[in-house]
Amino acid sequence: MTDRDQSWSRRIALAEVPEQGLHVVIEADAGVRAALMRTANLRDLPRLEASFDLRRRGVNGLQVTGEVVATVGQNCVVTLEPVEQNLHEAIDVTFAPGPAETLGNEEGAASFGMTDAEPPEPLPDGIVDLGAIATEYFLLGIDPYPRKAGAVFESGAPHEPADSPFSALEALRDPAKKPPSGRK
């Protein structure tokens, strides 16, 4: 099986979201977790799940909030010992129809203005893939430099710099200094 065969997809159409909203919980199976372990270069991924609350925003928009929760096994960047961390990533994404469609409320007024913090994500064909959202937030939430508690990187004692090409010039400036061995 390839990584593509292990896609974590849960597609929800805007038409499936009732006016009062929709709550969806998804859990990654062993195949999906194995594929994500390879993608993220993890040691272990025993748990990965996400919960979402979907609400309509205007006539054709969708607000998706929720959380991705995972237990991630990595190796400490200092000691190389196993480190297990709990990942909790909050999700808050607004989706809007593509440029060919209009976004507005029942009266046709636009629901998104220039004052919004981020522009809405596209909602192609009126469908959102919750598995893709969960995967994106999961991958972004992984600590790129995990450290075991108390692990401190200690560099060695400062060392004397090796002879540089300029040490011969230094000797010319100060005749008391000898040029490095092998040079006259």
Image (spheres, rainbow, N blue to C red):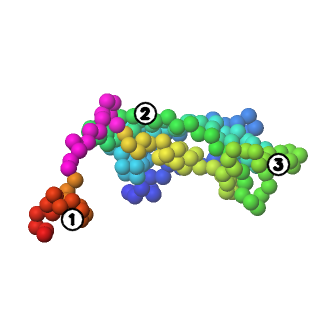
Secondary structure at badge 3 equals loop
For residue 110: magenta? no
Disc on the earlier residue, 1 or 2: 2
Q: Position of residue 63 (x, y in %)?
A: 68, 42
Circle 2 residue: 86
Q: Residue at x 39, y 34 (%)?
A: 85
Which residue does the image show at 63% across and 47% down from the upper left? 12
| Residue 177 makes an appearance in the image | yes
Could you tell me residue 7's position as x and y percent? 48, 52
**Residue at x-position 67% and y-position 54%:** 122
Report which residue position mark 3 lands on.
110
Which residue occupies the foreground of this view, 42 or 46?
A: 42
- Measure the C-alpha gap from mark 2 to mark 3: 40 Å
| SS at circle 1 | helix
- For the record, the magenta segment spans 147-160
Mark nearer the viewer, 1 or 3: 1
Residue type for callout 1: Leu
Of 165 and 106, the residue lying toward us: 165
Left or right: 113 as drawn, with respect to 173: right
Quarter in which the C terminus is drawn: bottom left
Question: Tag 2: Cα neighbours inside 10 Å, few (<14), some, or many (≥20)?
Answer: few
Q: Amino acid at mark 3?
A: Ala
Structural distance between the alpha carbons of marks 1 and 2: 62 Å
In magenta stretch: residue 153: yes
Name the residue carrying label 1.
172
Q: Earlier in the sequence, mark 1 or mark 3?
A: 3
CA gap, disc 1 and disc 3? 77 Å
Whether tag 1 and tag 2 are in contact, CB under 8 A, the answer is no
Residue 18 — which label?
none
Residue at point 86%, 45% (across, down):
106
Q: On screen, 69 above or below 130?
A: above
